[in-house]
Every structure is written in C-alpha cells, then in structure tokens.
Image: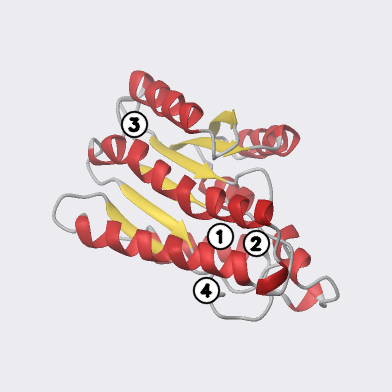
Amino acid sequence: MSEDGKTIALVTGASRGFGYAVAEALAGPGTHVIALARTTGGLEDLADAIEARGGSSTLVPLDITDEGGLQRMCLAIHERWGRLDLMIHAAVHATPMSPADQLGEKDWDRAFAVNTRATQRLIAVTRPLLIAAPAGRAVFITDDRAGEKFFSAYGASKAAQSALIESYRAETIQTGPKVETFTPTPMPTALRARFFPGEDRSKLSPCKTQALLMIKTCLGPG
C-alpha cells in the first residue's frame, strides 16, 4: 500500500464495459483507481461513480499504444506514490470480422498494436512499480479466439498476447509481481456486439458480475 494507506490500482480500458465495471468495483475509501482509456466522457462518468462509492481516482485519457504517454504516466505514479499495488489490463481492440484472406492491413496492424505490442509496453513500464509494492499483482484479461473463423487478426493478436503473458508469469514467479489471467464469460459489451450483432444480450453475464468474480478469483488471498 501507499503511504496514505490506500491501494493504488491501475485499470486500462476503464471508460466502458468490463474495464469500467472493474474500476467501479475496486472503488472505495481504501483504493485509489488510476483509470486509463481513450474515451474522456466515459472516464468522467467513472470518476463520478468512484466518488459515489467513497473512492478517489486519477483519470488518464490516453491511447494505450502511446509508448511515451505510458512512460510519463508511470513516472507520475512513481513520483506520487512510489509503487503500484495492482494493474488490471482490460483494454482491447476488436477488429472487423473478416476471412483471413480479406483482412485489411490497417486492421491487422491495429490489432497487434493494441492487443500485443501495447501489452508488452505495459509490462515493461509497470513492472518496476509493481515490484516496489509489498505484494504487487498484474491481472490480464484474456479471450481465446485463436483458430475461429473470421477472427483472424483478433484471435492471432490475443493468442500472441497470451503467450507473452505466460512468459511473464513464468519469469516472475520468484521475483514478482504475481501475474494472473482472467477470461470473463460473454458479456453485453460493445466489443461483443461488434462480433455478434444479432445476439440476445439478455442471456449474457453482466459486466459487474464478471468484475466481482475476477476480483474474488484473482485478488483473493494467496
């Protein structure tokens, strides 16, 4: 914990969907949430929700592919708190559904820039802060679509991300931080709607339910 006794938690993709639900669920008097996302309006709504729960927040309107921006954010975290107790990486990019032979180059590049390369950058810039905490933890939100038809870029970039995370987990068993992964069940998010636009959303699990399950599963004792 930081000097003021609060847990310092960074949540990416925090302006909507699962990331928003996680940030709100973490909020409370004992936690300061650092919320990162591109959508400023969603972050402002989140700040209000966090305040209503008695918590505090720092909003970071930033494209997660901005390496310099990530470095500046982590420098600011270091200067203010000296550590990061928790990092939850929920930011993701959904490419258009497409046969593998028809996928646009820009869509392919964006999928890997957000889902894979940005994850590696985030690992690099947050690890020093996480190991400075007494029990730093990193949680990555995964989604296995590798090999499914029309998921070529998304599935490939998320599979590469999972391989990267598993290497990070293996490398940090002795040194920290503790690395966890969580795969939520289908939720009524904008990302899901992009993949399955005609789906009955009433049958999907609420983001809040999955956020609470993630906290119980990944952030419990041990």
Q: Earlier in the sequence, mark 1 or mark 4?
A: 4
- Residue at image point 60% right, 36% down: 63
Q: Is residue 24 above or below residue 43?
A: below
Circle 3/circle 1 CB separation < 8 Å: no
Q: Which residue is mark 4?
A: 144
Q: Secondary structure at mark 4?
A: loop
Q: How many marks?
A: 4
- Residue at image point 77% right, 73% down: 196
Instruction: Give the distance between the C-alpha atoms of the residues marked 3 and 2, in whole angstroms.
Output: 28 Å
Give the side of residue 219 with respect to residue 56, left or right: left
- Residue 195 screen position, x and y as percent: 74, 69
Q: Earlier in the sequence, mark 3 or mark 4?
A: 3
Q: Residues within 10 Å of mark 3 (few under 14, many from 20)?
A: few
Disc number placed over residue 190 in the picture, else none: none
Q: Earlier in the sequence, mark 4 or mark 2?
A: 4
Disc number placed over residue 211 in the picture, else none: 1
